[in-house]
Image (spheres, rainbow, N blue to C red):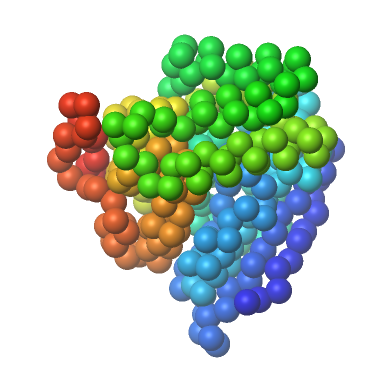
Amino acid sequence: MAQEIIRHLTVHGLRFAYRVLPCEPGGRAPATEPALVLGGALQGMFGWPQMDEHLGPVTDVVTADLPGMGTADPLPPGPGAALLRDAVTAITDDLGAPRINLFGFSYGAAIAFGWARQAPQRVARLVLGGVPVHIGEVQREHWHRARARLEAGDEEGFAALAADGLMCLDPERPVHRRELARRYVRRSFLHEVRSGSPHTAESLHRALGDRPDFSGGLSGVPALVFAGEHDTVTSPGRQREFAGTIEGSRFLTIPDSDHWVILERSEEVAALVTGFFTGREPGSAPARPGLPRQAPGGRAVHSAGHG
């Protein structure tokens, strides 16, 4: 595998970094534009080995610790969306890339969508997953309880509540590797707290207070939106409605998964993203396009193409 490159940048006085894994296409030119991967608030630039494996042979893989994440400086108080979009611009400029492929997941989907709306001419293709279009009051109350545990010094209680609030724990809904993913997410939250990360409490505060703007639509950018079929953070139905605001987009559900589909179905997601970025049909991964399907409990899981 190629030697990764770490680049350090500054935006609005805040230090952050990004990582490039150069493509190794066996002497051929990369098959597609560089792929920038943006994850959740606690997902840093070293947390995407499946993307390295699948995307690495066809293009440069770019991951980042944006301000407020990983090793970067904390975000200042107040809305941070514009600053984070400027950080994505700084990465793209530093790469010297006229256009990039852009993948945003969960919290990162808001950043990616906002940047695509701001600079559609610089986005070759866009993939968004686990899009937090709507956070209901039940979810918000759960996260308030988790934050209270953290403020009270109950680190393990916080980690358990924070992880469980992002997962489907209904035994009637099958989730592949549910307990493995649950243990991993809990450990990740606990590690962030015990490592003294300045971002954990702030990320939780922003998750409760910030209202990402997914309105306004988008045109001129080939786009794919996907969701775990049992996503309890934002339902697949709402994510499908959001996908319908992007001209010509495709929408898919990934079976037997919830909001943490990137852990539970990591290989399938990586194959899906790689296929879309290289021009292959998104259905090459085991996803469900087409008509609504009846799920356990009588709920319809919607998945369809647009355009």
| Quarter residue 234 falls in | top left
- Residue in the picture at 46% in, 32% down: 167
Front residue of 191 and 51: 191
- Residue in the picture at 16% in, 34% down: 294
Q: Position of residue 63 (x, y in %)?
A: 63, 54
- Residue in the picture at 82% in, 44% down: 15
Q: Is residue 105 left or right of residue 189?
A: left
Q: Position of residue 220 (x, y in %)?
A: 38, 47
Indicate whether 24 appears above or below 208. below
Front residue of 235 and 282: 235
Q: Position of residue 208 (x, y in %)?
A: 59, 18
Front residue of 69 and 168: 168
- Is residue 208 in view from this perspective? no
- Residue in the picture at 76% in, 51% down: 17
Q: Is residue 63 left or right of residue 218?
A: right
Indicate whether 15 appears above or below 297. below
